[in-house]
């Protein structure tokens, strides 16, 4: 580790061995958890064309583009998330963490053949009534130019002694002007697992999902975000924009879901809801830079 608190890796770590290790890793954070303060960095990351094509197909992006989908680099920096969560300094267990939100900003289109330098660090953390929340901030550089950034917020559930605030009454669902139906099968979750390297058992089979407390297997949250971006691609009018989503409820498979959206000039608001159009699975916003 250098004096600037950077830990430089020779290559991106492989996801599957880390996930296997994560499955047996147990940690006790204590009442005042302390998170690592260093930055992970890996240079000269070249995107695998075969992985990129699997990702495009799994999420619904065009296979003809020479640039990266805005969400693709998340599957690369996810490996840095896992690497850091397996560090002995990291206070919470990686398995069981709930993905609360994700914000991706693309400052310009990124050629699929451009080698990139990726960085990852813990941006912040706080103790809430539900447990310990923390955020990873990741960025991608082409040379010295920052071309992309990603912030993911997670929750590690535990007792904290903090009293929950009263829940606000839920109002009537927002009425949107546009609507699309997305059909999601079990094969979509497995295809995304192969494309992303995220082989969490809750996304692979009903039996393994039930072992971990789910009634059926669920789709990856970041697949949901990517699928929304792919479905809305004709409405996105710029190659430099920010997309923020909050993950609300899991999508049990198989499922039909409703993608509702409104466009105001270049701004897009959207929600992914259950087939009845009432329960939100994901709420998102796209804003041009």
Image: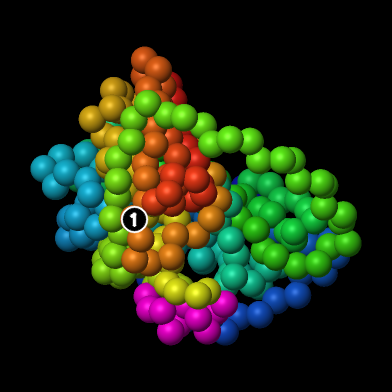
Q: Residue at x 82, y 47 (%)?
A: 165
Read off the magenta span.
Answer: 204-213
Between 286 and 111, the residue placed more toward the observer is 286
Between 184 and 234, the residue placed more toward the observer is 184
In this picture, residue 203 sits left or right of residue 62: right
Magenta residues, dominant SS class: helix
Q: Dot 1: within a 10 Å radius of its alpha carbon, few (fewer than 14), some, or many (20 or more) residues?
A: some
Quarter of the figure with residue 30: bottom right
Confirm whether the magenta stretch covers residue 207: yes
Q: Residue at x 17, y 44 (%)?
A: 62
In this picture, residue 39 sits left or right of residue 256: right
Q: Quadrant of the C terminus?
A: top left
SS under mark 1: strand
Pinpoint residue 214: horizontal percent, then vertical percent. Answer: 52, 74
Is residue 8 something that shows in the picture?
A: no
In this picture, residue 245 sits left or right of residue 261: right
Pinpoint residue 54: horizontal percent, then vertical percent. Answer: 21, 59
Is residue 157 something that shows in the picture?
A: yes
In the rendered image, the residue lying farthest to the left is: 64
Pinpoint residue 16: horizontal percent, then vertical percent. Answer: 39, 75
Confirm whether the magenta stretch covers residue 123: no
Q: Which residue is mark 1?
A: 256
Q: What colour-coding does the image apply?
A: rainbow
Q: Residue at x 23, y 49 (%)?
A: 60
Q: Residue at x 37, y 45 (%)?
A: 258
């Amino acid at each position: 580790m250098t004096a600037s608190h950077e830990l430089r890796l020779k290559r991106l770590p492989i996801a599957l061995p880390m996930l296997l290790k994560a499955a047996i890793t147990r940690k006790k954070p204590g009442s005042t958890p302390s998170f690592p303060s260093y930055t992970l960095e890996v240079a000269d990351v070249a995107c695998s064309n075969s992985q990129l094509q699997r990702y495009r197909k799994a999420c619904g992006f065009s296979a003809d583009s020479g640039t990266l989908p805005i969400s693709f680099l998340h599957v690369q920096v996810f490996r840095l998330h896992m690497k850091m969560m397996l560090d002995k300094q990291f206070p919470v267990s990686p398995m069981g963490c709930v993905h609360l939100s994700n914000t991706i900003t693309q400052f310009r289109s990124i050629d699929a053949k451009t080698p990139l330098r990726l960085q990852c660090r813990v941006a912040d953390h706080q103790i809430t009534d539900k447990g310990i929340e923390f955020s990873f901030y990741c960025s991608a550089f082409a040379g010295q130019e920052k071309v992309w950034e990603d912030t993911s917020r997670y929750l590690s559930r535990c007792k904290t002694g903090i009293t929950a605030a009263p829940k606000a009454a839920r109002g009537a669902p927002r009425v949107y002007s546009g609507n699309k139906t997305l059909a999601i099968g079990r094969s979509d979750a497995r295809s995304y697992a192969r494309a992303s390297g995220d082989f969490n058992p809750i996304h692979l089979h009903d039996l393994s999902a039930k072992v971990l407390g789910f009634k059926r297997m669920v789709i990856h949250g970041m697949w949901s975000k990517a699928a929304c971006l792919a479905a809305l691609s004709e409405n996105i009018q710029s190659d430099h924009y920010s997309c923020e989503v909050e993950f609300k409820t899991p999508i049990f498979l198989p499922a039909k879901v409703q993608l509702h959206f409104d466009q105001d000039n270049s701004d897009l608001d959207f929600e992914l809801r259950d087939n009845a159009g009432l329960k939100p699975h994901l709420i998102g916003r796209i804003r041009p830079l």
